[in-house]
Image (cartoon, rainbow, N blue to C red):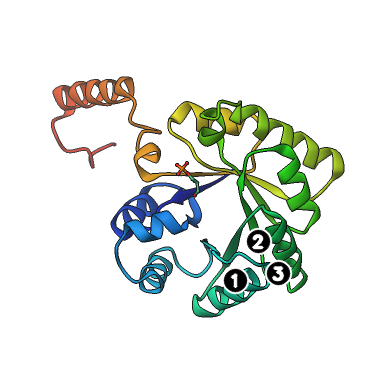
Amino acid sequence: MKLYIDSANVEKITRINEYYPLAGVTTNPTILATEGRPYLETLKNIRSIIGMDKELFVQVLGDKAEEMVDEGKYIVDAISGKVVVKVPVTEEGLKAIRMLSAENIPVLATTIYTGMQALLAAMSGAKYVAPYVNRIDNLPGDGLRVVSNIVHMFLQYDLGCEVLAASFKNVQQVYDAALAGAQAVTVSPDIIEKFVAFPSTKVDVSEFRQKWTAAFGKDHSNLG
Ligand code: G3P
């Protein structure tokens, strides 16, 4: 399982990267626009925070496949390290996925609502597919069922494409995606911070500290 942070906020990425086992950072046009700064500057700042080896995902905006391919190549050239180009799964997107993959540029097929979209993206050469769990739930549909069906199909056809589930609004959805076998998830910082913010753990830790201090004083370095 790989964990990505879905954000372009450098302060939040810095903090989450310090504490959590991040595989990289995913962005989308809305996330980058929200920061209100030039997007290339933001992406380069993110790169300097996460280092060269972690993946950084950037989405294209073009209508036509050729435009998406040009944008993808521009992004890969402009940002150092491991960059993955995000392409929405439309007809033009499928064509762009094939063209970019043929040039060994890694692609994440995004805005996925159905197993069929994921299957076609994988057949077109995508390295990752991103089903939008919470947005599917709101249709209303069953986001987790879509994730689980895609995982099952990819295994059955040995497609070598990973499921990077996205669009989560709570911790349970993320956990369910992990249980469904998604190889990766991308999660907003506020939800990542809830992963271990469990009241009982805090109570236990505080009780352990009280007992220790009562017996040995405050010096925790004196463990012998
Ligand atoms: O990055 C794309 C995806 O995560 C969208 O999430 O929360 O806007 O539905 P959300």
Location of mark 3 (residue): 100
Q: Which mark is residue 107?
A: 2
Name which residue type carries label 1. Answer: Gly
Relative to 168, does residue 121 appear above or below in the rendering?
A: below
Circle 2 SS class: strand
The residue at the point 48 percent across, 26 percent down is 172
Q: Which quadrant of the structure image shows residue 71? A: bottom right
Who is closer to the viewer here, 70 or 181?
70
Q: Find out whether the residues at labels 3 and 2 contact each other: C-beta distance under 8 Å.
A: yes
In screen coordinates, is 67 left or right of 40?
right
Residue type (three-letter) at the residue carrying disc 3: Leu
Q: CA distance from mark 1 to mark 3?
A: 8 Å
* CA gap, disc 3 and disc 2: 7 Å
| Comes first in the chain, label 1 or label 3 | 1
* In this view, the mark in front (1 or 2): 1
- Name the quadrant of the C terminus: top left
For the image shown, how many numbered marks are present on the structure?
A: 3
Which amino acid type corresponds to the residue marked 2 in the rendered image?
Answer: Val
Vertical position of residue 89 compared to residue 181: above or below: below
Q: Residue at x 33, y 30 (%)?
A: 197
Q: Which residue is mark 1?
A: 72
In-front residue for pair 56/21: 56
Residue shown at 65%/72% (left/top)?
69
Query: For the point 65% across and 61% down, which residue is it?
Result: 107
In what element is the residue under mark 1?
A: helix
Q: In x, y percent, where is residue 164?
A: 60, 46
- How far from the left and from the top, in percent, is residue 154? 78, 42
